[in-house]
Image (spheres, helix red, strand yellow):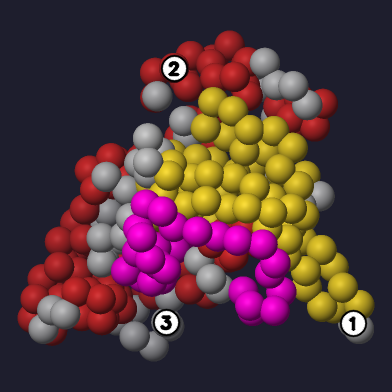
Amino acid sequence: MTVLASIGELTVTYRRDGGKVTALRSVSLDIMAGERLAIIGESGSGKSTLALAIAELLPSSSADGRIEWPGLGRTPLLGRDIGFVFQDPSASLDPVMTIGKQIAEVARTHLGLNWSQAYAKARNLLERVRLPDPDAALHAFPHQLSGGQKQRVAIAAAIAAGPKLLIADEATSALDTIVQTEIVALIRQLVAEDGMTLLFISHDIALAAELAERIAVFRHGRLVELGTTARIVGAPTQAYTRALLDAHIGLDAAPLLDLAGRRA
């Protein structure tokens, strides 16, 4: 497989209250083109910081190390090469702009479409993410949609320019269990249809096992374990990974291993 992105000795340090907090510590990781990779760990483990660093959404002064893109051959452009789905769609969507315009603007900016073409693409994307009435949604504002519907809109905007990499940063954590399952299935389908690479950030190892082919486990800003989903779920080498598995009430490795095998 081709390496899409190569991360080497990445350290990220934030300044806070006159001091420094290290969020990532010498992380090295390759993201393979076309794979579905999950980053898991508890809150504060550095998962979202890694996602922001990859998308170049951090101040350059905070990061030390390298992020290279051999699979692109150039520095990626957020929106065009990287689609980013944030945890809270209410915060990531513009409250005073219609849904259609927000998606169409991405298509216009990165694909050079005129407004008519961009709105047609936005309508198609709303249909692809399974909004019940795409035509009405084009003219709706975010506050008129449910949380799950807004996250579908955010996904549509993230894939509007046909990115190579889709980053979903805790994109299901603010949703109820049923909607979580629907969003995970939707992401999986869209990634497969468009041939995207997926970086799925979550604290939920069960969701990661359902979606990803590989799992990277983070703790205290360090990458502590990396392997196929079947290996991580069935034979973790680190006590911390075992603790994440045990933290899920009623979680048994057998059904997760079966799930990982069927979804690979």
Q: Is residue 197 above or below residue 260?
A: below
Q: Is residue 108 above or below residue 34?
A: below
Q: Which comes sooner in the sequence, label 3 or label 2?
A: 3
Badge 2 marks a residue whose secondary structure is: helix
Labels 3, 1: front one: 1
Which quadrant: the C terminus?
top left
Labels 3, 2: front one: 2
Q: Which comes sooner in the sequence, label 1 or label 2?
A: 1
**Kind of residue indicated by mark 1:** Asp
99 or 52, which lies in front? Answer: 52
Quadrant housing residue 102: bottom left
**Kind of residue indicated by mark 2:** Gly
Residue 171 horizontal/vertical position (percent):
51, 54
Q: Are marks 1 and 2 in contact (CB under 8 Å)?
A: no
Q: Which residues are magenta?
A: 58-86
Report, in whole angstroms, how far the alpha carbon at label 1 lies from the one at label 2: 47 Å
User: Residue 188 colored magenta?
Assistant: no
Q: Residue furthest bottom?
A: 96
Quadrant housing residue 106: bottom left
Q: Which residue is mark 1?
A: 17
Mark 2 crowdedness (10 Å alpha carbons): few <14, some 14-19, many ≥20: some
Q: Which residue is mark 3?
A: 94
Identify which residue is drawn at 62% across, 58% down: 50
Q: Of the numbered discs in the image, which one, if any, rests on residue 261? A: 2
Identify which residue is drawn at 25% across, 76% down: 110
180 or 103, which lies in front? Answer: 103
Badge 1 marks a residue whose secondary structure is: loop
Q: Are marks 3 and 1 in contact (CB under 8 Å)?
A: no
Which quadrant: the N terminus?
top left
